[in-house]
Amino acid sequence: MIALCFGLPTDILAHALLPFLSTGELSCLDVAVANRQQRRQLFDIYSSMTREHAEEGLTKPEMAWFIHRSIAMERITFARRLPAEEISAIFCLLQGRARVSLLVKHIDFSPSSDSANSAHYSSMLKSCVNLESLKLSLCKDVTRALLIRLGKRCCNLRSLDLSITCVS
């Protein structure tokens, strides 16, 4: 089955087949491909892929896996109740990979609103300057100064969700 898939052109695999696999299924495929030539093709496919999101919310190990394989994340939704340390680690990973961080267009902090804080927002401003939408619903530590910096730094921002958020 795997050999049959790798007979298809790379662009078809990257845009028509692999984006529909879950993160777990991609991981299984990654482990299953041991042939050196097919593995090289798989990494070529990864580098031309863009993932919309991680199905159950993004965690640090998933982000590290995506970055190691040069899979760009266009939309990041943090996993529910993700610890603050993991959110920080994800932004550290992003800051080290400009190709990946520049493609991030949508970030949703709301599932981890209990953990997200001003340090995370500052890290986001450093690494994800091409944001088009940001969801800070239910988040704490949102200040007017942050919103001003956000407006200056993220020129493409079109949507900002501050529902049920107290801005100080």
Image (tube, rainbow, N blue to C red):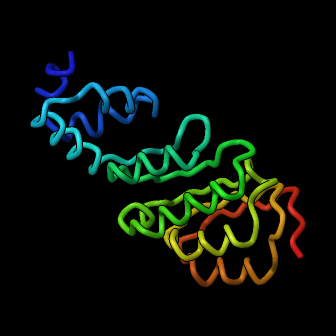
Residue at x 55%, y 64% (from the top left corner): 91
Residue 37 position by quadrant: top left
Camera-nearest residue between 130 and 128: 128
Instruction: State the image quarter where residue 147 is shown.
Output: bottom right
Residue 5 point in image, percent of width and height: 19, 24
* Residue located 76% across and 66% down the image: 117
On screen, residue 110 versus residue 153, left or right, reads right
Q: Position of residue 34 (x, y in %)?
A: 19, 29
- Point 14% across, 30% down: residue: 35
Q: Residue furthest top?
A: 1
Vertical side of 109 occupied by 155: above or below: below
Report whether 94 appears left or right of 44: right
Q: Position of residue 31 (x, y in %)?
A: 31, 29
| Count of numbered circles on the image | 0
Q: Is residue 6 left or right of residue 124?
A: left
Q: Nearer the viewer, residue 19 or 69?
A: 69
In screen coordinates, is 14 left or right of 157? left
In the image, residue 68 sits, relative to residue 131, either above or below, namely: above
Above or below 121: residue 37:
above
**In the figure, 19 relative to 90: above or below?**
above
**What quarter of the picture does the C terminus occupy?**
bottom right
Which quarter of the rendering shows the N terminus?
A: top left
Residue 15 at what x, y percent from top left?
A: 29, 39
